[in-house]
Amino acid sequence: MKIKNNVQLICQLSAVAAMSLAASVHAAEAFSTDSQWMTGDWGGERTRLIEQGIDIKMDYVGEVGANLHGGYNDDKTARYADQFGLGVALDLQKLMGWDNTQAKIQLTNRNGQNISNDRVGDPRAGTLSSSQEVYGRGHMVRLTQLWIQHQFLDNTLDVKAGYFGEGEDFNTFPCDFQNLAFCGSQVGNWATNIWYNWPVSQAAIRIKYNITPEFFAQIGAYNQNPSQLEHGNGFKLSGSGTQGTVLPVELVWSPKVNSLPGEYRVGYYKSTAPAADVREDINGQDAATTGDAYRSHDSKHGYWFVVQQQLTSHNGDASRGLNIAANATFHDKDTNVVDNYQSLMFVYKGPFDARPKDDVGIGFARIHVNDDVKKNAELLNLANGVGNYDDPLYSPLRSTEYNYEINYGFHVTNWLTVRPNLQYITHPGGVDQVDNAVVAGLKIQSVF
């Protein structure tokens, strides 16, 4: 009897294991809603590669922007921009026996057009933000990441070196909104021509020290080389064209508040490259009036704050609930076009029991143009004898742009999120003469 019972138990366990395996195989099939990848697990080969230390990354972001009302040009149209990503993350401990060592290689390719460039903003001034954040940095393939990372002293000290951008580690922020003012590292959006966000990479090193499990400090050094922005230089690894170094430092605290996660960042950056004054000439006078060269400063700097905190859970489910986030950056008034920026966002994850993985978000952002930039434009117009905004030679006066976005993220599958959104831009480009604009957007995020 005992043997018979054991046989029955083994048969039952085998049946459960078989059903579990069948479910696992089914979930890993291409286009399965339960798979984390659109192309599936490749018959289990993808999981085997990950177990060996090779994690292949393939993703896609596509964004549509349509001008529904207002803006500089109210001729209604829609624009599409996208980005393809291909890369591999390597666990070198599994692959080569190098303890606590990782590496990453990532390529990106961007294409398309941006509704903000000529419909929302005056082309003479542009917009400060962008209604399609994925647009920019050329229609080309770029080497976005090529780095190796190692942890020392029982993982207390973390060093990363190679080619990557500042926003990968400093002033980091997720990118679930479509408007640029709510997406990614904000310092790079406003620190003019020195801090290069994704997909541009720079020769760099980042050193992080974990002071406690919830608190760390880090410092970095990034080669400042404007030639890497040029078309055709997506794989440039040489230092020719270097102008200086960007040096960011940051403190990061990740506490649990009422058992809910949060992250608080404060940082400072300095660029050692020469930077032109936005108004004064070499003698300290108004360059627009004297016609002399703009004064050169030996550096430029700024600082930032980032707050992310989950405020509530949903019926005890910590994966759902209300989250708040805020960003603020402040920049060198002598050399930077934008001298300060602030944003506030609210995102509710899992708002409906029938759609527990969806999210709804709303964001508000303010982008302020340096008063000296506005004064310089006034002086240029005066020097050129131009006073009519409609004159092609007129330099638009810029002050403050406000961006608003509300969106809903449909978690269609584990590998596909579709996010319709509505944006409102007040004084696009900070130009009062440009009508406030309404933009309808659609963001598609997929993992292959």
Image: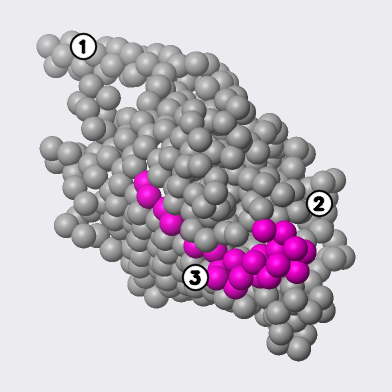
- The answer to which of marks 2 and 3 sits earlier in the sequence is 2
Is residue 278 visible in the rendered structure shown here? yes
Query: Badge 3 is on which residue?
Result: 330
Q: Quadrant of residue 248?
A: bottom right
Give the distance between the C-alpha atoms of the residues marked 1 and 3, in whole angstroms.
70 Å
- Front position in the image: 200 or 441: 441
Q: How is the image coloured?
A: one colour
Q: Locate residue 348, reporting x and y percent.
A: 27, 40
Residue at 28 percent of width and 16 percent of height: 16
Q: Is residue 246 left or right of residue 312?
A: right
- What amino acid is at disc 2? Glu
Crowding at mark 3 (Cα within 10 Å: few <14, some 14-19, many 20+): many
Crowding at mark 1 (Cα within 10 Å: few <14, some 14-19, many 20+): few
Q: Locate residue 176, reporting x and y percent.
A: 44, 41
Give the distance between the C-alpha atoms of the residues marked 2 and 3, in whole angstroms.
27 Å
- What amino acid is at disc 3? Phe
Residue at 31 percent of width and 30 percent of height: 357
Q: Secondary structure at mark 1?
A: helix
Magenta highlight range = 363-387
- The answer to which of marks 1 and 3 sits earlier in the sequence is 1
Query: Badge 2 is on which residue?
Result: 230
Furthest-bottom residue in this view = 283
Query: Badge 1 is on which residue?
Result: 8
